[in-house]
Amino acid sequence: MATWGSYTTGFMRIQLTFLLVLCSVLSAAQDSIHHIPEVVVSHRIARREIIAPQRLGSIELERLNAQSIADALRFFSGLQLKDYGGVGGIKTVDIRSMGSGHMGVFYDGIELSNAQNGQIDLGQYSLDNIDEIALYNGQKSAIFQPASDFGNAGSIYIRTHLPQFAPGEHRHLRFNASYGASNTLRSSVLWEQRLSSSIRTSVNAGVVNSDGKYKFRYRRMTPSGDIAYDTTTTRLNGDILSGRLEGNVTGIIDRGYWIAKAYLYGSKRGIPGAIVNNVWRRGERQDDINTFLQVHFQKDVTKRFSTQLLGKYAFYRAHYVNRDTTQLPADNRYWQQEGYLSTVNACDLLPGWSASMAYDLKWNKLNADTYRFPFPTRWSHFLSIATSLDFPHLKMQASLLGTLIKDHQREDGGKSLHRLVPALFVTVPVNETISLRAFAKQSFRMPTFNDLYYTNFGNASLLPERAVQYDMGIVIDKSWGNKGLTAIHLQANGYFNTIHDKIIAYPKGQQFRWTMLNLGRVHITGVDFSSALTMVPARQWQVTGKLQYTYQDARDVTDPSTSYYKDQIPYIPYHSGSAIMSVLHRGFTLNYSFIYVGERYNEQENIPYNHMQPWYTHDLSLQYEWTLGGIRWKATAEVNNVFNQQYDVILNYPMPGRNGRIALQVTL
């Protein structure tokens, strides 16, 4: 019988040979149609998106009362933010009730991943240097992308700022400083330098220091309806000291570019834990070091053929300490490594028709100093083929992703898995204003190392989680003149998702630990709606607004004999939404934002005891920009949770009430 090594080697040889043959064929095809006029790089057919995402640009992000990427994501429809409260609390996202594991998060084109627990803590990533955040349902519907990108049920693409210099400029320098509730001090600096006509660098560094304390009201009822606890107290052990350093070097080459990035994040923080049985203080602490190096190379080899190479190495260290006398003591260290390589090739075969092929290789390894730790290693291979049609009355993309995954651990050979994941995206432009769109897609995710192997809460018998998505929608875009209502955008989508062997995680009293189980089958029916408008009511006035709404019915349909059959799954609200409005006049900008999350349940059974009330927050901010002495200044004052709403996103993890912040930005 062939060994795993020989099987893998043969598999890789077949893929590489296929890639080389495909490149040759596509190059020949290009030579035969060289008379077709050149296409501008930014509008190449292979890079066009069949279905546009939801986006927040740099200007919109600056106007939000948001300090991290996680805070900004609350304003996308179809997303639920899991927030454990405070400045340093863990923040993850869930797309259309399918769980965080189905959401891919990409930082400048390369995925952020965590094989240990599958949770990307988006609170660690600042908005200081972000140009755009885009949310894709299904997958990014452009075929010129890495193979593993085709495997996600949804994707968040985070794009940092690339230095742009006017003629004669060689340097930019920007300082940010803010002070707010919980004695939170944030400061950052951005330095951009043009080294030559083709090479630019940037360095962005930031520090956050906070004691994490805030007042909250704790009120709990007994099953009989009597008041068990009702008091106002202070959230403790939520302090954080973190530092972030990011460096970039960008090079422009003939018909292409390359970007090298280094990222380092370190933090020391308390984990406030759940408020249970009138216990307010926990003894949990966690130190993190997250660092990665990544390289992105892209070039148009000919007018019709493009190639892209990606590489990354990441190292993550977590030190978890629990000295709570009411729980088992812990002092554990975890080391995680990741290696990633990707090659992507795309060709415009004919006008309106393009194809691509990509291969990714990913390696993950986890070590720990805990007793009898299995030291798991995972090798993942991804091979994708995709094609795209782009005609005036029909835009279509079809893709097929093949995945081969092999786990190794100390005790045995681990598990292997292979899957094929198809997807089809279609957009039909009705006219210049209205377009119809739809997609169908399969996807899956492997259980994480925590899910499978961790002592006391791992579950080695977990099955991979499989998802099927169907989506139909309509988009209306209309623009007018320079006065009155100048632009409007309306988008509505209805969808149905089926999850088989759904994996869910419950906090186990300690934020770092989880209880894992397969729910079986979940049916998810939902509607997303979003709108945006721009108005110019008078000279030097501008009004912009966005409105998002989500309806989700996510029910466990595994076993009719259970008490929770056809009940809403935990923490998924039926209704949620957000609104953003900005009024600009001269250098002043007044911003208002609103978040609403409807009723939901914190356990599998939808009974009154597990019911959680809706919550909503109103935020206000005022910004003023001016120039003095050739220096640009911007001052901000904001009030969050204006009406002091008392609420939990996750049960027993109270969120801050009314709080404020002042900030100053200086640009040289």
Image (cartoon, grey):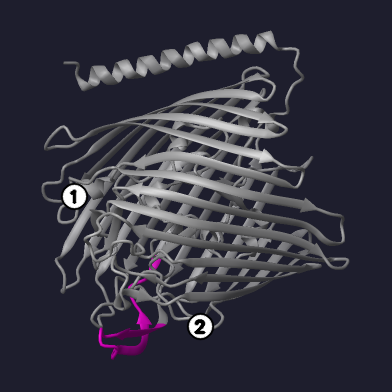
As measured in the structure, the alpha-carbon distance from the residue carrying label 2 to the one carrying label 1 is 41 Å
Rendered-image quadrant of the C terminus: bottom right
Task: Say whether disc 2 or disc 1 marks the residue closer to the N-terminus.
Answer: 1
Residue 398 placed where, x, y %? 53, 30
Verify whether residue 221 appears in magenta. yes
Instruction: Name the residue tied to disc 2.
Output: 644
Q: Which residues are magenta?
A: 216-240
Q: Is residue 549 left or right of residue 241?
A: right
Q: Is mark 2 in CB contact (under 8 Å) with mark 1?
A: no
Which residue is at a point 58% across and 47% down the rendered structure image? 160
Helix, strand or loop status at disc 2? loop
Helix, strand or loop status at disc 1? loop
Instruction: Name the residue tied to disc 1.
Output: 459
Which mark is nearer the camera, 2 or 1?
Answer: 1
Residue 198 placed where, x, y %? 67, 30
Q: Is residue 342 left or right of residue 372?
A: right
User: Residue 282 occupies which quadrant of the picture?
Assistant: bottom left
